[in-house]
Amino acid sequence: MANPRDRQPGGKPSHSAEQQLIQDLFAPLAKDYAGALGLRDDAATVAVEGGHELVVSKDMLVAGVHFFADDPADLVARKAVRVNLSDLAAKGARPTCYFLGIALPRRVGHDWLELFVAGLLQDQGQYSIDLAGGDTVRTDGPLTISVTAMGDVPVDKAVRRAGAQGGDRVYVSGTIGDAVLGLALAANEKPSWAESLDTDDVSFLKDRYHLPQPRTELGPVVRDHATASMDVSDGLAGDLALLCAASGVGAEIVLANVPLSRAARAACDCDRSLLRRLVSGGDDYEILCTVSPDKCIQFEDAAATVGVHVSRIGSILDEQSGLSFFDESGSVVEMTSLSYSHL
């Protein structure tokens, strides 16, 4: 759809500039995906093999909210793609293609877009996906990016939030809280715990914020073993609350079992209250899932085989009793906030 602001005198939309931009920069990203039709049509066709179904994820990123306005364009592009791939992985889906919508402030020029496209191209190669379509508009507001990603799974095999049962074990991949710390460092907040970090720690934490690592390789393992699953985008505690609500269950979590990176652990050693912030912060993009007790060993072994570390952090309760958090001594830990809120 044409942007009303992008009209020539007399009301005729200036399609030529938009189409030239698409063909010069974005069409090459779609050249290997037949259903994209060279990005010359209003819609793409998505072929689904027999016995499979589509899984579709959509996320929006806004400058000043989800990334800094002066972040490198290639990192912004890769983050926009990766947060969607994280959703697909949590459903057990194999990524196939994505659609891109971008609202460009008038100050954004061709050089920025070329770097943005370079970031997309890099992750297309890394994750074996293709651009299938989208839309570009100009705006007087902040840079806004919308990505819709598609993947496929065998029919009825997508892992939902609903499905956790009493007695299931709660697992999370990777490490938690790095992005929260990385955001604070990137924003130059100069927190007291930063004094405990070396240069490598600071670089690691900032990278975890700027460039999520979607656990796509864990997707098939989740599909084969998990009873419920979602990715951790708004905070481990809050996202677990959503999973429990969808499943009609409660959960008990031992905070000492929440996996932390070396850098995050050093920060927590400096500020003992920091752990509660780490489990309620966003942008981890790890997989949170539940596994029945009889499949735990197989799940852990399969995760290790694909090179992803998973940690058992708690258990599911039979009834919808909310979440309880405990320290290593068994004392209840009160959480003042469970997750980041977008509104």
Image: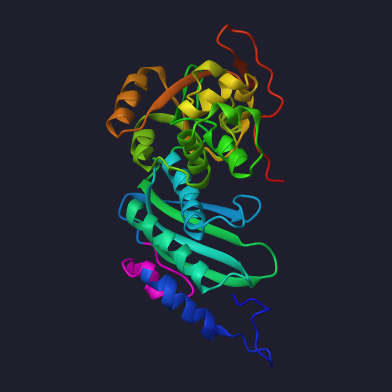
Residue occupying image coordinates x 34% and y 52%? 126
Q: Nearer the viewer, residue 77 or 23?
A: 77
- Considering every residue shown, the one lying at the far top of the view is 329
Quadrant placement of the N terminus: bottom right
The scheme the figure's colours follow is rainbow
- Report the number of numbered marks: 0
* Residue 251 visible somewhere in the drawing: no
Question: Over which residues does the magenta segment extend?
Answer: 29-46
Query: With respect to residue 33, does 237 lie above or below?
Result: above
Query: With respect to residue 200, does 45 lie above or below?
Result: below
Where in the figure is residue 342, as x and y percent of width and height? 68, 45
Q: Nearer the viewer, residue 27 or 75?
A: 75
Where in the figure is residue 221, as x and y percent of width and height? 34, 34
Where in the figure is residue 297, as x and y percent of width and height? 33, 19
Residue 37 on the magenta span: yes
Q: Nearer the viewer, residue 15 or 261?
A: 261
User: Residue 329 lies in what quarter of the image?
Assistant: top right
- Considering every residue shown, the one lying at the far left of the view is 305
Query: With respect to residue 202, does 342 lie above or below?
Result: below
Q: Nearer the viewer, residue 5 or 210?
A: 210
Residue occupying image coordinates x 48% and y 40%? 203
* Residue 138 visible somewhere in the drawing: yes
User: Residue 145 lies in what quarter of the image?
Assistant: bottom right
Query: With respect to residue 130, does 83 lie above or below?
Result: above
222 vs 178, left or right, is: left
Residue occupying image coordinates x 49% and y 18%? 257
Residue 292 on the magenta span: no
Residue occupying image coordinates x 37% and y 39%? 219
